[in-house]
Amino acid sequence: MRKLYFVFVSAALFFTVALLILKLSTSSQWRRGAAERSWVSGNHESLFSSRQRELVDQIEERVEEIIRYQEPVRQPLPKGQPVGFSDSYRARESSFGRSHTAVDVFSVLWEKTRRAAGNLIRGTVGCSDFRNITGIEFLGSGYTKTVLRGNLQDGTAIALKAVNSQGDEVMRCIRRYGQARDCYRLAAYKIIKEITLLQKLRHPNIIQLYGQCYYGSLEDGPVITAVMELGTPVEMIQLLQTPWEERFRICLSLVKLLHYLAHSPFGSVLLLDFQPRQFVIVDGELKVTDLDDVSTEELSCKTDSDCVLEFPTRNFNLQCSAEGKCQRINEKRNLYNAFRYFFTYLLPYSAPSALRPLLYEIMNATGDLRYGINKTLETFEEVLHLYKSGLYRINHSQSWLEDYKIFEGFRIQENTDYKCWPSYNHQGCLLSVYNREEAAAICHSQQQCQSFIITHQTTWSGRYLVSFRSSTDLILDINSTVYMKSSSLKAPMWKNQDHKSSSS
């Protein structure tokens, strides 16, 4: 019989999570049990068939990764020698014989990884905190993982990641090897790898690890649940409808992330599955949320012809270094993926006209891989400086503010007003500006605009949010100031009202 995998300190959470994941089940317990029995009762030769050795090799490879990531700088071992467990494997094979070696190898690997992970995966949230997690909901499942959401005792929203027992990785493994428990374990090592990396790779644009629950044994099966920061999935269609400043922030976040990955403690880190779905947005910042599919190995080569960077629409030829590695291939692959998945759609459209030449230079240089990540980040920061400082408006000599009357202590009557795109408020026209001169210029350029109010809100870059209005109906508000076109003034509008007005 299949044993329950999800055993937490809190019985309530245990059953909640277990039931949610078991709902995905499409195979019977009898079939899973049969697969287990066929493995245990098979003859000695079947235990060490090529396929079963292949499964052991895959598990060994994942364990090697986890142990390697404990210490970013290690002396390389002789080629072909597994990290940390090859001697144990040989000893058990010789002393117990071939019929027991597979199970014993798994035991060695599991305990070795558990000890290694136990030294690494520490966080503020552990198994004892799971009893206080509330609002468990199913978010989705993928190739390896099931993702739930919940709330910590203090109300913090979290994501819970665990092995998807009915995911493609586990089910394909079972169909090939007939070993349900060890196929599940193979997937569990992938989550341990991600937790380990999240402990080592700390950056504002990498999802934050709050903690983990690590429970299970060789006999019961591993239960690994990662507790992470909750973000909003990236939806390109929605991002295209946001103001340029927010889209630029997304691209800048990505560039900062890729700069960190190019210079990480492990060397250059490659995001193997570089897709928008691997990212989330947290408080306006883009963060990578999946680190189980990354590589820290640069492609080996003998000549430059071995270093071809291939994409669906074009290829790039890179150089082979004296060390036998394709130079900066991980960095360049990440950067070109950023160009084709993010920059192309989010960067240039509706940007301030004075910044567009610089933005198109970024597009062309990254699209041709003429810029590395260092130069790309430098150019992005130059754009940000020009935008935040207002220097991009240096050629705007015309002052439109003198055409406006200023009414302190008033605001515009709240009613349905005109809409503009892209606006921070989809029910009106709310845009960011550097100063009131820019606000006056924007109002002048919009035929419907008759007045504007500089709100008390600012954007992430420190710019002011301004509400542009077609209405000219004033009402008293000591905390507000209205800027109104002189041509819009109507004498009865403020007649017999106590007001203060001045011209610019």
Image: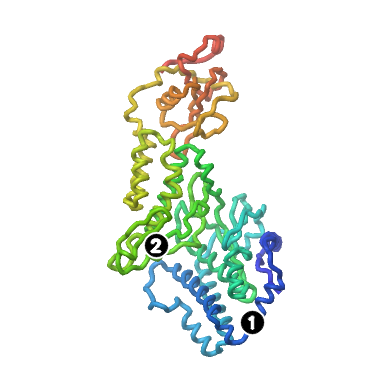
Place of residue 137 in the rendered image (x, y in percent of width and height, measured from the top left): 66, 53
Q: Amino acid at mark 2?
A: Pro
Taking the spot 48% from the left edge, 37% from the top edge, the residue there is 243
Query: Which residue occupies 72% across, 73% down?
Result: 30
Residue that numbered label 1 is attached to: 40
Where disc 2 sits, the SS reads loop
Residue 256 locus on image (x, y percent): 41, 50
Quadrant in which the N terminus appears = bottom right
Tell me whether circle 2 and circle 1 mark residues in contact (CB < 8 Å). no
**Left or right: where 344 falls relative to 490:** left
Q: Say above or below: 407 vs 327.
A: above
For label 2, the residue is 265
Q: Position of residue 439 (x, y in %)?
A: 44, 26
Q: Name the amino acid type tagged 1.
A: Val
Total number of numbered labels? 2
Helix, strand or loop status at disc 1: helix
**Label annotation for residue 250:** none
Q: CA distance from mark 2 to mark 1?
A: 42 Å
Which quadrant would residue 303 be assigned to in this image? Answer: bottom left
Name the image quarter holding the C terminus. top left
Label 2: few (<14), some (14–19) or many (≥20) C-alpha neighbours in 10 Å: some
Left or right: residue 314 compared with residue 150:
left
